[in-house]
Image (cartoon, rainbow, N blue to C red):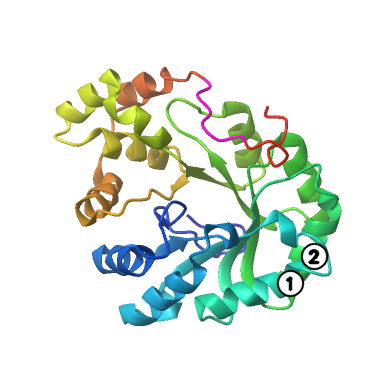
């Protein structure tokens, strides 16, 4: 998935959102062993140090991995943001991450969007991160962020997106701006896995419903960051990349839209489009 500046975000990554400190070293190591080259963490997951440990123990050179972290809302102020990112780099045992995101717009937390986006752009200029982006931003906030940092600077907007929540208006705006859509919770906390349509399509392809949902998102050009603590699921999710869905399959999955949002924390989330 090449961006305007030629840097590539891997199409499939391993998300460590729900992975405990205890499980993270093993899970991340297994993800790398099974073929993942993109690890997606965040300050608020409290497992950056464990991710750093697993990467160090994996034997895979840092240059072959794509590492994403996210700035937590407590660190948005200009006096804190860069220092908090440096602390993340220390935990992750790296000089720079590949991608740093603002985790939530948090409209009421006292730091205005132009302020924290400006400081994030400065962190990139200092070489702390190769790319910058946002997460959970609505259309208006995405446009405001572009105004602050410039066109072509926002690598991705990482959003909740699944067959049950397709976010079409936002996706259209992002794609028009050449901003990569990263879909998190593509399986909607597992709710889509028992969907009759997905199960039917999965049977036709000798695949799993999880693979079908991930393949649908990949087919649309989105990056995905599924999570699991089980090695067999890690391997199975990767295979979604080889699953060739038909146009008819895609249309059937598109028809599952039901605005089924799972995550919208008060004070952090925007007014959704």
Q: Quadrant location of residue 148?
A: bottom right
Is 256 placed left or right of 140 in the picture? left
Q: Is residue 96 visible?
A: no
Tell me what residue is drawn at x 78 percent, y 56 percent: 150
Q: Quadrant location of residue 174?
A: top right
Rounded to the nearest angstrom, the CA distance separating label 1 from label 2 is 7 Å
Is 246 placed left or right of 207 in the picture? right
Instruction: Name the dominant secondary structure of the magenta segment.
Output: loop
Tell me what residue is drawn at x 14 percent, y 34 percent: 206
Nearer to us of marks 1 and 2 is 1
Point out the stretch of residues depicted in magenta. Answer: 259-264
Q: Mark 1 near mark 2, Cβ–Cβ under 8 Å?
A: yes
Q: Which mark is residue 99?
A: none
Residue 46 picture location, percent across and down: 53, 63
Circle 2 crowding by C-alpha within 10 Å: few under 14, some 14–19, many from 20: some
Q: To which residue does mark 2 refer?
A: 119
Secondary structure of residue under mark 2: helix
Is 153 placed left or right of 144 in the picture? left
Above or below for 37 versus 87: above
Tell me what residue is drawn at x 28 percent, y 45 percent: 240
Q: Is residue 84 visible?
A: yes
Quarter holding the C terminus? Answer: top right
Q: Which mark is residue 82?
A: 1
Circle 1 crowding by C-alpha within 10 Å: few under 14, some 14–19, many from 20: many
Residue 196 picture location, percent across and down: 26, 19
Tell me what residue is drawn at x 53 percent, y 21 percent: 259
Is residue 54 inside the magenta stretch?
no
| Sooner in the amino-acid sequence: mark 1 or mark 2 | 1
Secondary structure of residue under mark 1: helix
Q: How many marks?
A: 2
Is residue 261 inside the magenta stretch?
yes
Q: Quadrant location of residue 204?
A: top left
């Amino acid at each position: 998935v090449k961006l305007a500046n030629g840097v590539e975000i891997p199409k499939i990554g391993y998300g460590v959102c729900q992975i405990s400190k205890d499980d993270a070293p093993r899970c991340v190591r297994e993800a790398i062993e099974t073929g993942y080259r993109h690890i997606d963490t965040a300050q608020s997951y409290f497992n950056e140090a464990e991710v750093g440990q697993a990467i160090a123990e994996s034997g895979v050179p840092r240059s072959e991995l794509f590492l994403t972290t996210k700035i937590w809302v407590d660190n948005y102020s200009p006096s804190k943001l860069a220092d908090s990112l440096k602390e993340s780099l220390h935990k992750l045992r790296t000089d720079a991450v590949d991608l740093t995101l603002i985790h939530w717009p948090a409209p009421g937390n006292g730091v205005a969007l132009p302020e924290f986006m400006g400081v994030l752009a400065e962190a990139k200029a200092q070489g702390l991160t190769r790319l910058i982006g946002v997460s959970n931003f609505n259309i208006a906030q995405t446009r405001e962020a572009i105004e602050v940092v410039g066109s072509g600077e926002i690598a991705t907007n990482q959003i909740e997106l699944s067959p049950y929540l397709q976010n079409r208006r936002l996706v259209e705006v992002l794609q028009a701006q050449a901003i990569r859509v990263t879909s998190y919770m593509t399986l909607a906390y597992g709710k889509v896995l028992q969907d009759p349509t997905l199960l039917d399509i999965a049977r036709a392809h000798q695949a799993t419903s999880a693979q079908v949902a991930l393949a649908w998102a990949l087919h649309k050009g989105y990056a995905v960051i599924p999570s699991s603590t089980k090695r067999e699921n890690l391997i199975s999710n990767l295979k979604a990349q080889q699953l060739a869905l038909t146009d008819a399959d895609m249309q059937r999955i598109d028809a599952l839209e039901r605005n089924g949002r799972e995550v919208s924390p008060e004070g952090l989330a925007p007014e959704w489009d």
